[in-house]
Amino acid sequence: MKRSFEPELMDSPGVDGPVLETFHRDLIFVNKVLGTFPTIERFLRQSDPAVRSVIDIGCGSGALLDYLRRRMNVEVLGVDLKPWPMAEIPVVRANAITEPLPEADAAVTTLMAHHLTPEENIALIRNAGRSCRRFLIHDLIRHPFPLAAFSLCIAPLLGKEAAADGKLSVRRAYTPVEMSEMVRTALAGTAGSFTIDVSRFLSRQVVDIRF
């Protein structure tokens, strides 16, 4: 299954207002189906010393950070190119690939890596390592099975824009092998290490980078 380079509607600079609000609502639903928030929490709890502060790169609605703040009592801060005014957590506007990031114990990003080129992902990992000791990358996996599962079970429950973008997201996603290669390149020459956790039905992968 070849990787698609077709741009997603959500990446369009013109997406705003009610359409963007619908996207955020649908993404929260998708994350619930995937179990994203409990998964990120589980990984963050596997830390010594304990994680006390978290930044979410590409935080969108801020729902993940709101969840982590309630569940783990951590300090949270979102980073996004287009901060959503209705987010219930503090958000800074920044390009996380090229601009300095706030310092925190851990950085996370969910469903964002497939929006970036390999070079951008490598730069993002290196940038996160300058201000955080840990970086969790949660994303989809390019494979026919999750594409079929999303198309049949989840897409009919979403708005038409999110449904179309969701299918395209799977086609744009990286395989675990491709993701591993990007992370190895980003960490080359450093003391950093990483593991990749792949879910049973290939619905997601989590890269756990420690700098």
Image: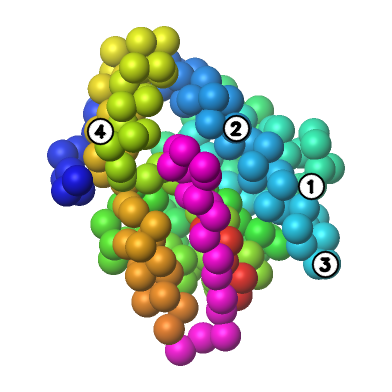
Q: Position of residue 101 (x, y in %)?
A: 54, 61
Please name the residue that numbered disc 2 is placed on: 35
Q: Which residues are magenta?
A: 189-206
**Dot 3 surroundings within 10 Å: few (below 14), some, or many (20 or more)?**
few
Residue depicted at 71% across the width and 44% down the height: 41
Q: Is residue 154 above or below residue 96?
A: above
Q: Is residue 92 above or below residue 162?
A: below
- Pointer 4 and pointer 3: residues touching (CB < 8 Å)? no
The type of residue carrying mark 4 is: Leu
Please name the residue that numbered disc 1 is placed on: 74
**Dot 2 surroundings within 10 Å: few (below 14), some, or many (20 or more)?**
few
| Foreground pick, 112 / 43 | 43
Q: Position of residue 178 (x, y in %)?
A: 32, 62
**Dot 1 surroundings within 10 Å: few (below 14), some, or many (20 or more)?**
some
Residue depicted at 37% across the width and 34% down the height: 146
Tell me the mark number nearer the camera, choosing from 3 and 1.
Answer: 3
Tag 4 secondary structure: helix
Of callouts 3 and 1, the N-terminal one: 3
**Dot 4 surroundings within 10 Å: few (below 14), some, or many (20 or more)?**
many
Real-space CA distance between mark 4 and mark 2, rounded to the nearest whole angstrom? 20 Å
Residue 27 falls within the magenta-colored stretch: no
The type of residue carrying mark 3 is: Pro
Residue depicted at 73% across the width and 39% down the height: 68
| Foreground pick, 139 / 120 | 139
Observer able to see residue 15: no
The type of residue carrying mark 2 is: Gly
Please name the residue that numbered disc 3 is placed on: 49
